[in-house]
Image: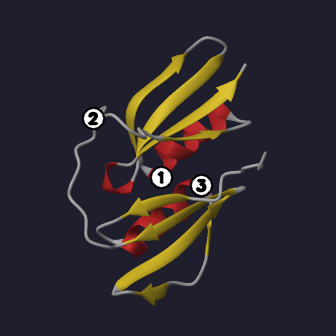
């Protein structure tokens, strides 16, 4: 049986550079140099061992609501209080929470282009 691991999350953005800077500002993401392919700008943002590929290909707008399919990106943190402080420090919008939920503390942040990002810490 093959083995699998997460390679990347793909974020379609109205403004690739602004989205990349948001990931850098909140998560201290390491950013690769931008490149162009098929008329789109691409930047890879590395948050720990998670890569977010950001592009500006054609897309349709979305609302920040629940929908079927993949709903959000969840990142574990080893310092929930520090993460909350950082969210407030950079002025990121909290979409839901923070809450205690079955042995975890979690909060949802509204990322660029209404991408929902969950930060959680197991108790």
User: Residue at point 33% right, 34% down?
Assistant: 68
Q: Are marks 1 and 3 in contact (CB under 8 Å)?
A: no
Image: 98 above or below 65:
above
**Residue positioned most to the front:** 1
Q: Which residue is mark 2?
A: 65
Q: Which residue is mark 1?
A: 90
Q: CA distance from mark 1 to mark 3?
A: 10 Å
> Which quadrant would the C terminus be assigned to in this image?
top right
Residue 27 numbered tag:
3
User: Residue at point 56% right, 14% down?
Assistant: 101
Q: CA distance from mark 3 to mark 2?
A: 23 Å
Q: Quadrant of residue 33?
A: bottom right
Label 1 or label 3, whichever comes before in sequence order: 3
Label 3 or label 2, whichever comes before in sequence order: 3
Residue 9, percent from left and from top: 53, 56
Residue 13, percent from left and from top: 34, 65
**Residue positioned most to the top:** 102
Looking at the picture, tell me which residue is in the foreground, 43 or 82.
Answer: 43
Using a 10 Å C-alpha cutoff, classify the residue at mark 2 as few (fewer than 14 neighbours), some (14 to 19) or many (20 or more). few
Q: Are marks 1 and 2 in contact (CB under 8 Å)?
A: no
Q: Is residue 69 left or right of residue 4?
A: left
Using a 10 Å C-alpha cutoff, classify the residue at mark 3 as few (fewer than 14 neighbours), some (14 to 19) or many (20 or more). some
């Amino acid at each position: 049986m093959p083995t699998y691991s997460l390679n990347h999350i793909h974020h379609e953005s109205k403004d690739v550079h602004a989205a990349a800077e948001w990931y850098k500002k909140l998560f201290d993401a390491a950013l690769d140099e931008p490149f162009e392919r098929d008329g789109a700008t691409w930047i890879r943002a590395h948050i720990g061992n998670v890569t977010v590929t950001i592009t500006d290909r054609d897309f349709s707008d979305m609302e920040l609501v629940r929908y079927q399919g993949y709903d959000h990106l969840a990142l574990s943190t080893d310092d929930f209080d520090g993460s909350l402080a950082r969210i407030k420090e950079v002025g990121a919008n909290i979409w839901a929470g923070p809450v205690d939920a079955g042995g975890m503390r979690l909060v949802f942040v509204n990322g660029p282009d209404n991408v929902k990002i969950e930060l959680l810490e197991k108790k």
